[in-house]
Image (tube, rainbow, N blue to C red):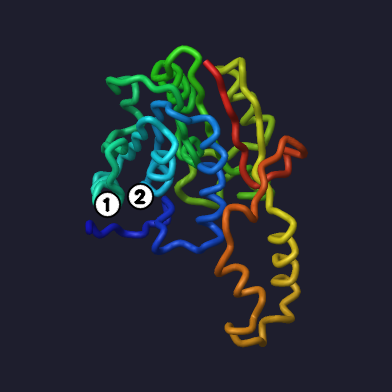
Amino acid sequence: MTEIINSGERILLEKETPLMIARHFSAYRFVKDYISNKQVLDIGCGEGYGTHYLSGFAREAVGIDYDDSIINYAKDKYRKENLRFYCFNIEDLHNFAKKFNVICSFQVIEHLRDTDKFLEDIKALLEEGGVFICSTPNRLDASPHSETPFNKFHAKEYDFLEFKELIERHFKDAEMFGLKRGKELNFYRRIKKIGFCNFLPDAINPVRRFYNQIKSGHFSITKDGIDTVLDFIVVCKK
């Protein structure tokens, strides 16, 4: 299988923590209800785990990323008749030769500088009545008390009102959701901060055991208190 370097720019299943994988995978689980028997494009697919998951529900799932090595890795790792991966730069989306019923873009828009062009290109790639689903981290959680992103790969992060205004400049029909930690995750997070389990061996440490087995179901997607969530998720209709 093609070897890839873990630069920190994208999620790699074999090299990332279960917590981060679960958080990112939550958006893909959310999308499955929108893609049954649809033509789906996953922009910024990375190593392809999410696109592969979507292919289990979609008529066809296409993943694109600008990095040739990551696309070759995805092609080697995930193979299905209705699954395609292409090396394609986001700046060239207007040249993509196909239209889609659903377009997904998770944790990508914060990497971009020309977001208005990106969103207009998305609209052009959508079939009439199509759906665009986009996620991005909440700046107030990702980079608290800072206008400059802590993540060196992020060009700009958004608070709720900034993200809402950006999306609604291009999509009038946009429904906002937010990703939050579930009750059990919040419980173990508090115990971890207190630290009284730190002295326990791994085999009997309940905090380490929980974090080693965490799943996307330990997060919840809500329409309440969106300004305080971890990630924003917006569903836009053309």
Kindly check if marks 1 and 2 are in contact, taking CB atoms under 8 A apart as contact: yes
Query: Residue 111 got which mark?
Result: none
> What residue is rendered at 55% in x and 55% in y?
22
Q: Which residue is mark 1?
A: 73
Circle 1 SS class: helix
Q: Element under label 2?
A: loop
Q: Residues within 10 Å of mark 2 (few under 14, many from 20)?
A: many
Across and down, in percent, residue 192 comes to 69, 71
Horizontal placement of 68 versus 230: left or right?
left
Q: Residues within 10 Å of mark 1 (few under 14, many from 20)?
A: some
Q: Which residue is mark 2?
A: 47
Give the camera-side residue of 40 and 144.
40
Q: Amino acid at mark 2?
A: Glu
Q: Quadrant of residue 99?
A: top left
Q: Amino acid at mark 1?
A: Tyr
Q: Residue at x 70, y 54 (%)?
A: 182
Percent x, y of residue 37: 43, 28
The answer to whether 64 is drawn above or below residue 49 in the figure is above
Residue at the location (52% across, 62% down)? Answer: 18
Residue 17 spot, x, y in % from top left: 50, 63
Q: Which residue is nearer to you in this view: 20 or 22? A: 22
- Up-down: is 180 above or below 224? below
Q: CA distance from mark 1 to mark 2?
A: 7 Å
